[in-house]
Image (cartoon, grey):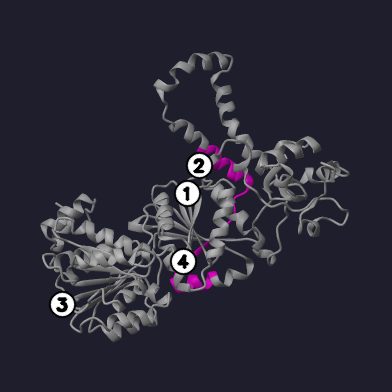
Amino acid sequence: MNAFEQLGLSAETIKAITELGFEKPTPIQEKSIPALMSGDRDFVGLAQTGTGKTASFGLPLCELVDFKSPTTQTLVLAPTRELCVQITRDLTNFAKYKGNANIVPVYGGASMETQIRQLKKGAQIIVATPGRLIDLLKRKAIKLGAIKFLVLDEADEMLNMGFQEDIDEILSHTPETKKVWLFSATMPSEVRRIASSYMENPFELTMGKKDSGAENISHQYYVIHERDRYAALKRIVDGTPEIFGIVFCRTKWETQDIAEKLIRDGYNADSLHGDLTQQQRDKVMGRYRSRALQLLIATDVAARGIDVNDVSHVVHYNLPDEMGNYTHRSGRTARAGKSGISLSLINIREIGRIRQIEQKLNTRFHLQRVPSAVEVCEQQLLKLVKKIHDVQVNEAGIAKYLPVVYEELKDLNREDLIKRITSLEFNRFLDYYRSAPDLNVDIAHQGRPQQRTEDNRGGTRIFINLGTMDGFDKGGIYKYIIEKTGISKNDIGRIDIQGVCTWFDVAVQSAEQVLEEFRGEIFNDRKVRVDLAEGERKKAPSSGGAKRRPAEHSWRDKGKGNWGGGRGRR
């Protein structure tokens, strides 16, 4: 027997949700569904994201809406396109066996004409973002005069995004007799105002404490120097090989920048922000849901409504400007009763803000240390061993090659073979991390950095006045530099080639050799000029050497192999 049957749902609805895997209601579903099934009073539900709020109002709506009539009877308002699409998908699944159900999503970034055509077919339920709904109201393409139920989902976020006036405008087009169901993760004064202005004696249900975070989220923070923020992010990801997370940034520009850096450094990552088209957003989210992406870099607004199972980590690349956004961000993990980690990267001046969030959420943040080189190597080695153990062997495909393989490896015993297989990949990132610096700030010494070890495998940026107009491509300039300087090919990093010039990264210990070997060089009757790139000269010691504290590039780019699913390049 399905436990949802005890809540008074019809056989058609039970059949639909059983096929979806619903067996036992969450706490908010257990309490809200019976209260909403009567359909005769307003409702306020306060609960964190991931607790099953969509089913809390969606299942009662499937029982209360007359799907035999084409009249629009329910309006659901959501803050973002993603949440709008998600709610529509869920409601459509819930009403699968109701017959004639037409649930239409209305949101910006999609064809308004297509949405109008769908509405003309008779939509019993409309799920909308405020901006697009108002546009359609002005065109008289939507009539809300027969609305019986109005659902405000993620009400606090809609107000944070500046939809206060839009909500007031929309509500003015609905009848006084409607019932308002409001769901929110927090209860700021603006949400309370909506409840008092548009609701009469609502049934209020609070799951957990108001404005609190989910209890099964572990809140962590890392204290680093501002300049090490990106390096610390990569180090934490490298030290957590199984991470499947969302990285939150403050701005669209920063989101795109961090995503591009991660992709360049070999990580499976992509960005989600407001400048993407709907088609681009759908593509990114499709890849993330299928776990083709390991890291989704997103802004607060763009990530609203993301409902992806088993997100292990939420990373606050920067703390949010609004306190409430921390709760919404963290709610992307630990969904449906599972556990998750919310970690914040902060500098020494932001420790006070962590204390404020602790007090607001009535929870405790745990100070963590950015993994050391040894710790990262240990985790990556364990992942490699597990990957080798779990690999699916294509018996038919490999059979004809095995005799040659056995012959080549016949002089190796079991122990030697294991050592060589693991060392094949392990040596690469072990070499990269061998002298990696400690990125943690010593809080006890008022933010003074702990002793750092110079990593001479980092990159120094160098300029050369040769480019594509001289007949070079990336491969050509790479070969030319090696031939003229005699440095190891592994000492050359990222190359950015343009028409008349090129910038390239070179290992710190080889930078001086590059500058010296190009001294007096002539190419096609033109003097070759090689120098430290702008900014590097300021960092170089007064002695004129090229030694500096390097940028921490990724070991994932060293060699052809790629650890941790790293080839996420466009």
Q: Is residue 175 above or below residue 540?
A: below
Q: Quadrant of residue 362?
A: bottom left
Q: Which residue is mark 3?
A: 40
Q: Amino acid at mark 3?
A: Asp
Pick whichever of labels 3 and 2 is earlier in the sequence: 3
The numbered disc on residue 300 is 4
Q: Residues within 10 Å of mark 4 (few under 14, many from 20)?
A: many
Q: Which residue is mark 2?
A: 565
Q: Residues within 10 Å of mark 1 (few under 14, many from 20)?
A: many
Work out whether residue 272 or residue 411 is closer to the camera in this orientation and state it.
272
| Cα distance between the residues tagged 3 and 2 | 53 Å
Going by the image, does 443 lie left or right of 336? right
Pick whichever of labels 4 and 1 is earlier in the sequence: 1
The numbered disc on residue 294 is 1
Pick whichever of labels 3 and 1 is earlier in the sequence: 3
Pick whichever of labels 4 and 2 is earlier in the sequence: 4
Q: Are marks 4 and 2 in contact (CB under 8 Å)?
A: no
Going by the image, does 100 lie left or right of 368? left
- Indicate the position of residue 318 as horizontal and vertical percent values: 55, 65
Q: Is residue 440 above or below residue 325?
A: above
Pick whichever of labels 3 and 4 is earlier in the sequence: 3
| Cα distance between the residues tagged 3 and 4 | 35 Å
| Cα distance between the residues tagged 4 and 2 | 26 Å
| Cα distance between the residues tagged 4 and 1 | 18 Å
| Cα distance between the residues tagged 2 and 1 | 8 Å
Pick whichever of labels 2 and 1 is earlier in the sequence: 1
The residue depicted at 45 percent of the width and 50 percent of the height is: 244
> What residue span does the magenta drawing correspond to?
354-383
Work out whether residue 4 or residue 443 is closer to the camera in this orientation and state it.
4
The answer to whether any part of residue 144 appears in the image is: yes
- Indicate the position of residue 228 as horizontal and vertical percent values: 65, 58
